[in-house]
Amino acid sequence: MDTEQAIQTAIQYETKVRDVYRDAAGKTGDETGRRVLQLLADEEQQHLDFLSEKLREWRQTGKVTPKKLSSVVPSREVVAESLKRLDCKVSGPAGAGELDLLNRALSMEKETSDFYRQMVNELEPAGQALFEPFMDVEDGHLMIVQAEIDNVRGLGYWFDFREFDLEAG
């Protein structure tokens, strides 16, 4: 796969996962969950915008210039540390439909993360530099979606988003 094909494929992955988050945000009954899912959908849209810009750049110049990928999601280390400190109990599980949507989002995030890892391992250095920042961002998304799934299942913990403010950027 060359860099242009990789960017086009990444756009397809990001579109699918964005749409899953939008769908889940519109169907969840939990207000905090809805806000988090909408934030993730918005971030995936930013990834799409970024990748579309890089595709245009590739087609015009035959190269992509490095640019920092921003994220509203804290680093995977911050997310992991916050998850360790959780002690809030969940009031009860939500419906199976919400769990299905979250499982779909988790599956899409895993697939997307695997794609980015593959591109970092296979592409030339410029392509690697383009996709490497996506790996940490997508890992953070995976952890957040898993925390939401744990909440919906009523496993006894709630992902305490007040530990860090996802909306602060």
Image: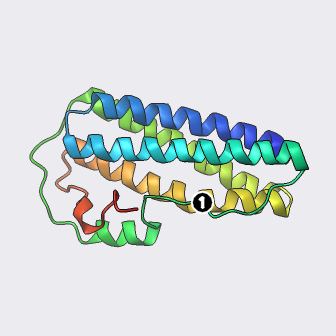
Residue at 11% over, 42% down:
92
Looking at the rendered image, the quarter that the C terminus falls into is bottom left
Of residue 43 and residue 9, the one placed in the foreground of this image is: 43
- Res 133 visible: yes
Which residue in the rendered view is the most extreme toward the left?
91
- Residue 65 position within the rendered picture, expressed as x and y whole percent measured from the top left: 78, 60
Residue at 38% over, 47% down:
39
Residue located beneath label 1 in the image: 69
- Residue 16 position within the rendered picture, expressed as x and y whole percent measured from the top left: 55, 32
Crowdedness of circle 1 by 10 Å Cα count: few (<14), some, many (20+)? some
Residue at 65% over, 34% down:
12
Quadrant for residue 55, please give it: top right
Quadrant for residue 157, please give it: bottom left
Give the image's coloring scheme. rainbow
Looking at the rendered image, the quarter that the N terminus falls into is top right
Residue at 31% over, 34% down:
99
Of residue 65 and residue 95, the one placed in the foreground of this image is: 65
- Res 153 visible: no
Left or right, 74 with reference to 128: left
Q: Amino acid at mark 1?
A: Leu
What secondary structure is found at the residue carrying circle 1? loop
Quadrant for residue 96, please give it: top left
| Vertical placement of residue 19 versus 159, above or below | above
Q: How many callouts does the rendering have? A: 1
- Residue 116 position within the rendered picture, expressed as x and y whole percent measured from the top left: 67, 52
